[in-house]
Image (spheres, rainbow, N blue to C red):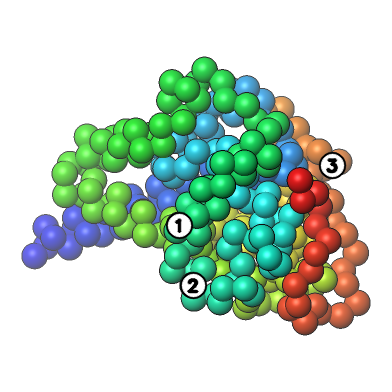
Amino acid sequence: MAAFLFASLTALLVAAAVTTAANLATTVYLHRCLSHRALVLRAPLRFAFRVLTWVTTGIRPRQWMAVHRKHHAFTDVDGDPHSPVLLGWRTVQLHNVGLYRRALRDPELVRRYARDLPADSWDRLLFDHALVGLGAGVTLLVVVFGWVIGLLAAGIHTVMYLQGNAAVNALGHHFGRRPYENSATNLQWLALLTMGEGLHNNHHAAPTSAKLAFHAGELDPAWPLVRLLAGLRLVEFRHPGGVFRPPAARRAHPGLPVASQAIDRG
Ligand SMILES: [Zn+2]
Ligand SMILES: [Zn+2]
């Protein structure tokens, strides 16, 4: 019994560490760097993030950025790949992966929305083989922690990572505060779980800001690390200091769909 408790607790801690790393790769590399060009990663760091994304997420970067950019182009109107306004937040929370895959059935999606990220030889060799990367990640966990803890940690990580990402798309367009006039919301507790992504209303107001926390009481957990990396000259910002903070709306947005976003509809 004690051995089972020890294995479960260890697996939970390992999974929490892996999910934190995956969320960091998602928000810094896939989202702030690739999708919005809010920051540029210097070559060694960029490659490290490519490897981290490959072994922890099962995502092909060009596909993620294409789906995400389409979400910004059609936020909560017809064409949004995962809108809780159109589909209901429960549907997006439970079927986020299916909605993501459905969007990718459009053969034009990646070509149109990720044309600035052509595949290179590393993509063809490694990073376009997302399941191979996941297999490598799980194998690493098993080699380091053994079969039981390794597989348990991989399972817990998969659930936590997918549910956290789904929550940004589902809850982050339904529940929470709207200091800016867009249909996304700020949820600080979700931001703590997703390395800042829960400050989604701020993000839709200023997609090219590398920092997602704009107001007193808001915390973007990825920001101290990003700023440290910038201090080491491994990160460059699009805006001075990495912050582009628009003036707050005079009143909270009622949650109606908005059409105007930072990215053209292609
Ligand atoms: Zn959104
Ligand atoms: Zn975005």
Label disc, if present, on residue 85 of the rendered structure: none
Q: Secondary structure at mark 1?
A: helix
Q: Which residue is mark 3?
A: 239
Could you tell me how far apart the alpha carbons at marks 2 and 3 are, in whole angstroms?
Answer: 36 Å
Mark whose residue sits in front, 3 or 1: 1
Q: Please tell me which residue is depicted at 22% across the width and 34% down the height of the picture.
A: 143
Q: Residue at x 60, y 59 (%)?
A: 81
The tag earlier along the polypeptide, 2 or 3, is 2
Query: Quarter of the image holding residue 212?
Result: bottom right
Q: Is residue 36 left or right of residue 143?
A: right
Residue under circle 2? 91
Q: Secondary structure at mark 3?
A: loop
Looking at the image, tell me whether mark 2 or mark 1 is earlier in sequence order. Answer: 2
Q: Quadrant of the N terminus?
A: bottom left
Q: Earlier in the sequence, mark 3 or mark 1?
A: 1
Q: Residue at point 50% right, 38% down?
A: 60
Type of the residue with mark 2 = Thr
Q: Is residue 105 above or below residue 48?
A: below
